């Protein structure tokens, strides 16, 4: 059920909500005094130029959408770093598409999606 809701939100919003979970060590203190915080975010970029959702978008249109996803991922790390007052590192990035949403009013809009996972190390108060 949760995955269905998350998928629906990812399709409905240009940028879905991010989830944050601390990466807890197996043993207390195993990751040191500053364990990383992991945040995963999904981005959507529309692919321009296709007249119909069933058309295969041009390579140029797909490249443009992919570059938009890369830019969103890079900008997100800067925002997370500022907001959390942490050092941010993009630890993984997955691009999928071109895809059209399954149903709804946006069904005719081919899109690509990017899922980025960031690792944040909170800065000490003295930094």
Image: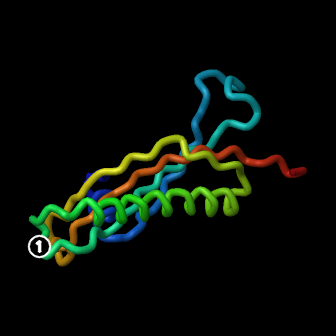
Q: Secondary structure at mark 1?
A: loop
Identify the residue at horizontal 57%, vertical 62% (top origin): 75
Please identify the quarter of the rendering in which residue 50 is found. bottom left
* Figure check: 38 above or below 28: below
Q: How is the image coloured?
A: rainbow
* Figure check: 46 above or below 66: below
Q: Answer few, some or many: residues within 10 Å of disc 1's Cα (few below 14, many 20 plus, some between 14 and 19).
A: few
Rendered location of residue 10, percent (x, y): 33, 62
Compared across the picture, whether 127 is left or right of 95 comes to right
Identify the residue at horizontal 69%, vertical 44% (top origin): 121
Compared across the picture, whether 124 is left or right of 17 comes to right
Identify the residue at horizontal 67%, vertical 36% (top origin): 35
Identify the residue at horizontal 15%, vertical 61% (top origin): 56
The residue closer to the viewer here, 76 or 34, is 76
Compared across the picture, whether 116 is left or right of 64 comes to right
Identify the residue position indicated by label 1 in the image.
Answer: 52
The residue closer to the viewer here, 123 or 109, is 109
**Could you tell me how many numbered marks the image carries?**
1
Rendered location of residue 71, percent (x, y): 50, 62
Rendered location of residue 86, percent (x, y): 71, 51
Q: Residue furthest right?
A: 126
Rendered location of residue 30, percent (x, y): 68, 23
The residue closer to the viewer here, 55 or 105, is 55
* Figure check: 110 above or below 31: below
């Amino acid at each position: 059920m949760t995955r269905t809701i998350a998928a629906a939100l990812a399709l409905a919003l240009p940028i879905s909500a991010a989830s944050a979970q601390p990466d807890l060590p197996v043993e207390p203190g195993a990751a040191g005094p500053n364990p990383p915080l992991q945040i995963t975010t999904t981005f959507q970029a529309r692919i321009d130029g296709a007249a119909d959702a069933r058309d295969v978008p041009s390579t140029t249109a797909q490249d443009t959408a992919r570059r938009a996803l890369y830019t969103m991922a890079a900008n997100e790390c800067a925002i997370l770093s500022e907001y959390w007052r942490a050092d941010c590192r993009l630890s993984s990035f997955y691009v999928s598409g071109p895809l059209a949403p399954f149903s709804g009013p946006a069904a005719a809009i081919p899109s690509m999606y990017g899922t980025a996972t960031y690792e944040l190390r909170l800065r000490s108060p003295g930094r």
